[in-house]
Amino acid sequence: MMRIYSTLLVFLWITSLHGLSLVGLSGKPYSLDTITREGRSFIRPAQVCDFLRFSATTEQNSFTLVSQGDTLLVDGHSGVVSHTGDTLSRARVYVEDSLLFMEARSFFSLLTELTSFYFVFQKDTVLVSREPQLPFYDVSGVVVVDPGHGGRDPGAIGPQGTYEKDVVLSLSKALRDYIESVSHITVYLTREEDVFVPLMDRTAFANEKQADLFLSVHANAALDNKNARGYKLFFLAEAETEMERQVEERENAVIEYETTDANRGVIESILSDMMSTEYQKESQEFTIHSLETLDRSVQSVAPFGNGVGQANFFVLRGAEMPAVLVESAFISHPEEEKILRTSSFYEEFGSALGSAVVSFLEINGSFYE
Ligand SMILES: [Zn+2]
């Protein structure tokens, strides 16, 4: 009895934490069967369509939706999503107890495209609307977002004790959520939690995912200048100014957290090697491109935008794609430290940087296509 009771409690806890609700036009929330894998929510397309009274059928692990004369087919084995015969994309799918689950964000973005409704993610709810809430871009590709530091490496620490590793994780998740809700781009994070990730593993992960863009997300600090504030975007090249050298030194200081002397030795020798300039031009282009969007959209710290910089950051070394490091705000500035703790900043900065990512890939296309 006790065992059943505790299982039930765990079940309730999981569903209340990760379960998605669909809020229809009537405003009534409808709780969706949700499973969570690798930090992503999966829902049953059949259940959603049943609730919305869309004409859909589920057969032998495949799901078919007919809307406005178009047919959407999701194959539960391969994850292949086809639209009136043409392969659209490959979605993350699971079949559990003969029920087909599909990654929620990609399913709702497909519904937004195929039906006359709009589906908007707001934390754990999905709002159904007749009005467009966010634009949707028909852009695909892969982006790796790297929340700096983590675990035993706190990164910079603000005057009120805020850790860089915590704020950059929240910001990175907001960035991912924005990009995935307005495009077909897949975003991977190098860490989802407060764990230590060795520097070399971060770009190795991006290379393995064949990412089109690698963004390392940080918060700046100037211990000798309490008035320094604002954001700055860096690409990999020799530092030219004293300020650039300071940021480079601080971000590369992470090396001391690497576990073995051998690791540290390798990192130091790589840092002194010649820098690859293969993606330097694209990386620089991305920083300039993003700056325009950030200067226009990020009101909270916009008047203090510090432009584009260059430095020899270890975390950008070895990336086989355009790679940039974003210093989102100064955690050492009392006001910006406060801003860095707010979800409105994550949403504001995340969506501005996210729209720069989407438009950059829209212009440049995917490197691996
Ligand atoms: Zn950092």
Image (cartoon, rainbow, N blue to C red):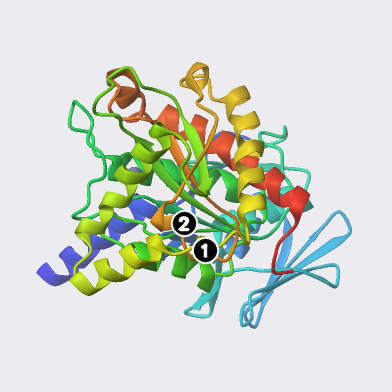
Observer-nearest of 274 and 172: 274
The picture quadrant for ligand 1 comes to top left
Is residue 63 left or right of 122 when viewed as pictured? right
The secondary structure type at the circle numbered 2 is helix
**Residue at horizontal 22 percent and vertical 55 percent from the top:** 151
- The vertical placement of 137 against 198, above or below, is above
Observer-nearest of 41 and 284: 284
Image quadrant for the N terminus? Answer: bottom left
Q: Is residue 19 visible?
A: no
**Residue at horizontal 66 percent and vertical 60 percent from the top:** 141
Amino acid type shown at disc 2: Leu
Image quadrant for the C terminus? Answer: bottom right
Question: Mark 2 = which residue?
Answer: 316
Q: Which image quadrant for residue 359? A: top right
Amino acid type shown at disc 1: Ala
Question: Mark 1 = which residue?
Answer: 319
